[in-house]
Image (cartoon, rainbow, N blue to C red):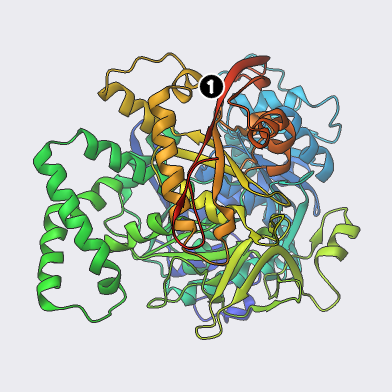
Amino acid sequence: MGGDRVVTTTATQSALESVPALLARNAIENANLTAYREKEFGIWQSWTWKQVKAEVDALAMGFLALGMAPGDHVAIIGRNRPALYWSMVAAQSVGAVPVALYQDAAADEMAYVLDHCGARFAICGDQEQVDKVIEVQEEVSGIEQILYLDKRGMRKYDHARMNWLMDVQAEGLAARSRFEAELKTRRAALNYDSTCVMLYTSGTTGKPKGVVLSNRNILETAKASCQFDTLTRKDEILAYLPMAWVGDFIFSMGQAYWAGFCVNCPENETTMAADLREIGPTYFFAPPRVFETMLTQVMIRMEDASAAKKRMFDKYMAHARKVGGLILDGKPVSAGDRLKYRMGEMLVYGPLKNTLGLSNIRVAYTAGEAIGPEIFDFYRSLGINLKQLYGQTEASVFITQQPDGEVRSDTVGVPSPGVEVKIAESGEVFYRSPGVFVEYYKNPESTASTKDAEGWVATGDAGFFEPDTGHLRIIDRAKDVGKMADGRMFAPKYVENKLKFYPNILEAVVFGNGRDRCVAFINIDLNAVGNWAERNNIAYSSYQELAGHPRVLATIQEHVEAVNASVAEDPMLSGCQIHRFLVLHKELDADDGEMTRTRKVRRNIVAEKFADLIEGLYGGADSVYTETEVSYEDGRKGVLKATVELRDAKVVAPDGQRMAAE
């Protein structure tokens, strides 16, 4: 495949100091194994490692023909597609730096990243992404070439500085004799200290920061994490999470190229569940929201099932909650319980896992936000080896992981291989490892405040190590953990995650720092509550109307009061019970600035935006009239008007007695 075939089967691991070097190795050692699959128009297409090497070589030489230089930043914008992953490796091959952007970001959000990194090239998945880049070109002057993958709708555009990606690839193939030697030279110049990728933080509290990650960061982390879970070339993964997120990069690029396993790209977001079932991956990652949504769909289906099926489901799920996790961890379980569990596997657990696409799972992870213990235990009770990890973009993901046999819902495990973790006197978690980022791009002040001279990185999270197990427990974001007016601890995430266990509740935001009591905003799950409304012949025309329905409010109140009873059992956090709540008249949305693109709540913005509602909750009002600016899909702005009902909830006194709602 050209002059750059310098890696052989006897090459030492130390020679593999870049993703392109790993590709060259895989093209020889795993030549005919499937590296990528993509579903398009309902049909799966596949490429071997040898074919991927040829695709990347042609793209890289096409980039050279366009004048791509070492150090250039190349924006990658689009859904998960093999050609976009290949574009990343091709850019790395010529010494450029790929910078992935969130495809659902608005044009002005993209403008900030494109301008900040000074991208010369933008590689777009389709017309929608091209349009966003064109829209911001007046304020982002550095972009010289726009490349696109999907030709649909692009025929009448001005192509003076625009090219179809396949044409670039074809030009590279045609000019092989001119560029082959230059490509070999540039690849040979790559080493562990070369920049592998730049990824932007989600910007929970401010502008996103460009995190510079080197080949050392990515490959050492990939190597250690693959060994930790014995990932091999036989594994399969579904690449469906945003390419701009560090998790997708480490799983679908770092680990995939290190271990040589297959990356499967679904057709689109709406077919993801069906594609998951068709692929049946062995290795799976999903943030808590995905697992919550899956569970909601299961519960909706069971509500629609016959009485006999519902009884069978409830019976065997109760048994699974009792012994499923123990069996998965290899703990002692009686022969009778094992037999009953096997019956449950045939009748309930097996078909359910097959429906979810999780039948072949060997290792599954969740991270990004804390997952509700009830949700976590549900999947493990089915025999799915779901574990938690704790990580950050700045760590190349991995800080702690849960070893097999030591998996619990209330910890995030032990330090990952090669990672050191310490707890400061303030309770903040610090770490250092080979995966620690190089710097924040063009931001030495933030780099210095986050990473000290000895390489220790401040996570911004509060936590502690359990003395008997050595497992790390994360309490909350350090900035969010506070104290109630009476001195008791305030940790909102703990309560929010308990609320989100209920399929009816999509999101929750708890307030109470420095106050005498806690209050909460609730977002209902439109799918779950809408399904319930249809079964009960309740008509509604919008989210807002359904969210304000008296029966919906009564149901949410039951959930809040059940959570209060659960929270009261924890002496350290019993002060976080919810005294008053409301169901928001709109869903929290990234387009409205209330969440990040990775679906993390921007707590301060929500508090500022809905200050009148918070004031009403603490002031004892029964309802509040409010007007909220919202963004529509076509970019227009509008105002949503609503009168929101505020409700009291029963709380549990320290002695265990229920107290009347105030």
Percent coordinates x, y for residue 138 in the rendering: 85, 24
Residue furthest toward the bottom? 468
Residue 548 on image: x %, y %: 48, 22
Q: Nearer the viewer, residue 636 or 211?
A: 636
Image x and y of residue 41, in percent: 37, 30
Q: Secondary structure at mark 1?
A: loop
Q: Residue furthest right?
A: 445
- Of 586 and 173, nearer the camera is 586
Judge from the rendering whether residue 545 lies leftward or rightward of residue 158; answer left or right. left
Give coordinates of residue 84: x percent, y percent: 57, 43
The residue indicated by pointer 1 is 152
On screen, residue 230 above or below 365: below
Which residue is more in the foreground, 23 or 108? 108
x 12%, y 43%: residue: 309
Quadrant assignment for the N terminus: bottom right
Q: Residue at x 55, y 62 (%)?
A: 23
> Height in image: 70 above or below 534?
below
Q: Quarter-wise, where is residue 555 in the image?
A: top left
- Side of 532 relative to 486 (left or right): left
Q: Quadrant of the C terminus?
A: top right
Q: Is 427 situated above or below 251?
A: below
